[in-house]
Amino acid sequence: MTAPDLLLTGGEVAGAGRLDVAVTGATVTAIGPDLDRTAGRVVDVRGHLVTAGLVDLHTHVFAPGTHLGVLPDVAGVLSGVTTVVDAGSAGPANFAEFAELIPGSRTEIVPFVHIGHNGLAARPDVAAASDLDPGGVRRVLAAHPDLVRGIKVRLVSPALQVAGLDMLRTARTVAREFGVPLMVHIGDIDGPGGPRLGPDTMDLLDPGDIVTHVYTANPGGVLDARGRVHPEVHAAADRGVLFDAAHGCKNLSFEVARRVLDQGVPLHAVSTDLTLTGRRQIVFSLTEVMSRYLALGFTVEEVVRMTTSGPAAAAGIADRSGTLAVGRTADISVLALSEGDWTVSDSFGGTLRVKQSFSPVLTVRAGSVVEPAEAPHPWGWLPEE
């Protein structure tokens, strides 16, 4: 039997115990105890958690003419993440430019296309109903059927005042034509948005569509004025709509999270909504965001699932990402789970204490090993003590 190119030894494989993982080329070729140490490279990962490559379901890694985007590999392999989903940074006007950049990244980039003509290169992204570009989105989807995995809609001001829920209806029509999901940003409403915006939004979503920022405290979220989850949210969950807790600079509230969790709404993905500003000020990295969900009471296993198989399924890439198994692409994250006492923050001034925190140790992307680099804090990857 040919020796593998890479052997990760002694790690705690998520859900399976202490095992070795062998990689040949870009493929996982063996997982088991005490595998043959004959390999091109042997890495001792004892004491660390070995998971399928982390998938960040909501990032912004393309920013033409803006200071919004994070470099894909900074959000990705340099931070322990093998795959980033770009949540509608590009629209039809600039998607071709984005598509040309994607092959140069070591991190896998999975783009959603914005329903607005210019994507986030225009601020606001939708200032008039004429900014909606369903025809352009159709052309992008037709030209890149194996690349683009969905359509992004931001139900925010001032777009709501000029286009209302027609934005969502327009995007929904195109999405259903091409068999791709919607990713719908809720919250961030100024001025009249209508008290039923949250419920009416949910009624327009189909199985596999994604609600992002589910724990936002901004108007237009999943809670009514008395802090109760709208019935339409439960109905959406029951029929297979997916919920993503994208953090962002202003869209994660610990208080809202606890209310929503207490009322039984499932969570399918934990993501960053990472931008250059967020990385510098509050979001920092996917592993740090993961630690905040430990503070909310999720288990390590639940948080790992919501950053591997959950987002991979939501993004339509479960055939190649989100699962660590023999025969699959060798996308692997090796994480430290440190013990300590840290303060973690949400986007609204709320804080929690957490006794465990994730940090990246090693990333394997399609069989290539990448060491973490460009930590977001002067002291490294862990939260502030």
Image: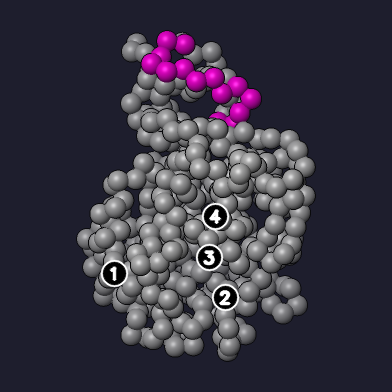
At x 44%, y 33%, the residue is 370
Mark with earlier residue (2, 3): 2
Q: Earlier in the sequence, mark 4 or mark 1?
A: 1
Q: Which residue was labeled with disc 2?
A: 188
Residue 74 percent coordinates (x, y): 46, 47
Residue bearing the label numbered 3: 211
Residue 92 bears which disc, if any? 1
Q: Nearer the viewer, residue 224 or 341?
A: 341
Mark 2: amino acid: Asp
Asked whether, in this view, residue 95 is left or right of residue 195, the answer is: left
Residue 45 inside the magenta-drawn segment: yes
Task: Write the residue at 42% across / 76% down.
Answer: 123
**Which mark sits nearer the N-terminus, 3 or 4?**
3
> Is residue 38 a member of the stretch shown in magenta?
yes
> Taking 339 as reference, is 283 above or below it?
below
Question: Residue under circle 4?
Answer: 279
